[in-house]
Amino acid sequence: MAMFLEDIVRSVELWLNLIKKPQPYVDPSLDPVLLVPGIAGSILKAVDKDSGGKEERVWVRILAADYTCRTKLWSRFDPQTGRSVTLDPKTNIVVPDDRYGLHAIDVLDPDMIIGRDCVYYFHDMIVEMIKWGFQEGKTLFGFGYDFRQSNRLPETLECLAKKLESVYKASGGKKINIISHSMGGLLVKCFMSLHSDIFEKYVKNWIAIAAPFRGAPGFVTSTFLNGMSFVEGWEQNFFISKWSMHQLLIECPSIYELMACPHFHWQHVPVLEIWREKKDNDGNSQIILESYPPEESIQVFKDALSSNTVVYDGEDLPLPFNFDILKWADETQNVLSRAKVPPGVKFYNIYGIDLETPHSVCYGSSEVPVTDLPELQFCEPKYISVNGDGTVPAESAKADGLNAEARVGVPGEHRGILSDHHLFRILKHWLKADSDPFYNPINDYVILPTAFEIERHKENGFQFTSLKEEWEIISEEQDDHDNMVNRKPFVSSICVSQTGDDRSSPAEACATVTVHPHGEGKQHVELNALSVSVDA
């Protein structure tokens, strides 16, 4: 008899899937969310001062990307101001604020059609959150910034303070949920350390995702010596070359602030290893493996980049490892170490796991040793990996040094985690965009069924089984949802029967499905079923 009821439930669920068509709706009870990206996660535009403010998108773009990077984004660090100043004196780099800041952190190259997902940043999360009832400009906002700059640059922190105030006012005085990704976590932590009073005034929760709280050792070491690729796959052939990115990032304080924290008690200290050929006192050659911990690696960076130059506007410019930036980054580490979560604010940490993540880097081999350190720029690095998200080791991301409400590891790739449905389920719970009292993000991310009741009893030789189940759906009749509240409930029925024979007893089941129209396109569905069988 139980099979009858299961058949009925499956039939109703199939019917619900056929009529269910999610439509955007607004949940006015939600608190506002501000999304903060990480390095390379904001659209940047170059404003030409000599042409009346003509704008050109310089990050991200596929066509002419490399040329635009070299002419518009290459910069030099000014130790007096802490800024990286663009080499082109006629160019000013700005971040667009369209769609309440979301445009700059959504799809980083909106013109791209084929392979567009490779330049997604917060796109999937924005789409998902709108389904939950968030609304752009009311409860959903973005904060893009010039990621070349330091995470404690006063101008950037001032812009963030103004953003928090504007979001607070736009949402009717509700405190804000900040969701940061990657280096955006360092930016938020710097702000919290230097402006704790403003943070406490406007922020309710801060959720950090894949933040390199203690650095990204393997990523930064290879970036200093070889550059990095933001886009992988075939699209990389049309994007900025690793060499151009290398020259850009050498003058970016943000990269120096991602170096391995030398005072952190690493489970395994990240090292830079180099196979080198050296001669002993007798003039005999021998191959040795040199190993440099974080502080000693700095001398290697200095020697390897001592002759590094770029040609800009016909001029040969030296571009060595920058000790002025290193000094600035050391102070940033001090700022980060002093950060505390203000009273009344809750902090959550989500970190990526289950991927091999560069931790230590090795150059050369016993067969082909490195003979001169400047060669490292042209050597292919080999990585010693640990658990993490492919970019940030889990050990670094977990070590936030803050009083956290929860720390949760989610399997996923560093940027790809922003499209992960497990992550969405956790965020939905912490943002109170659901009402599942049984969900615990720390040890359980299974979505439980909706209301379900079943009862059984026997009477006069018959066995009775009753079932009640409920669903919430969103109606496809969104164009007329204002009148749905006034409509009468829709009622339908299902009957199933079976005649007894030598192998089974007579049985019958019937069910009633009632659809109650609600406001905002929602409908509440109730299934009441009863089965009767002869007690064999």
Image (cartoon, grey):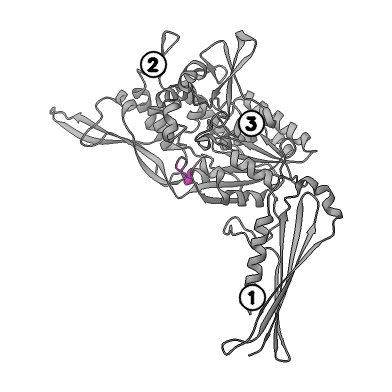
Q: Secondary structure at mark 2?
A: strand
Residue that numbered label 2 is attached to: 309
Residue at image x 39%, y 16%? 309
Q: Amino acid at mark 2?
A: Thr
- Give whichever of 256, 477 is nearer the camera: 477
Residue at image x 74%, y 32%? 165
CB of mark 2 within 8 Å of CB of mark 1? no
- Is residue 454 among what the camera can see? yes
Residue that numbered label 3 is attached to: 103
Residue at image x 71%, y 35%? 197
Q: Position of residue 417 (x, y in %)?
A: 53, 44
Which one is in front in this view, the residue at disc 2 or the one at disc 1? Answer: 1
Alpha-carbon distance for marks 1 and 3?
51 Å
Q: Secondary structure at mark 1?
A: helix
Residue that numbered label 1 is attached to: 4
Q: Residues within 10 Å of mark 1 (few under 14, many from 20)?
A: many
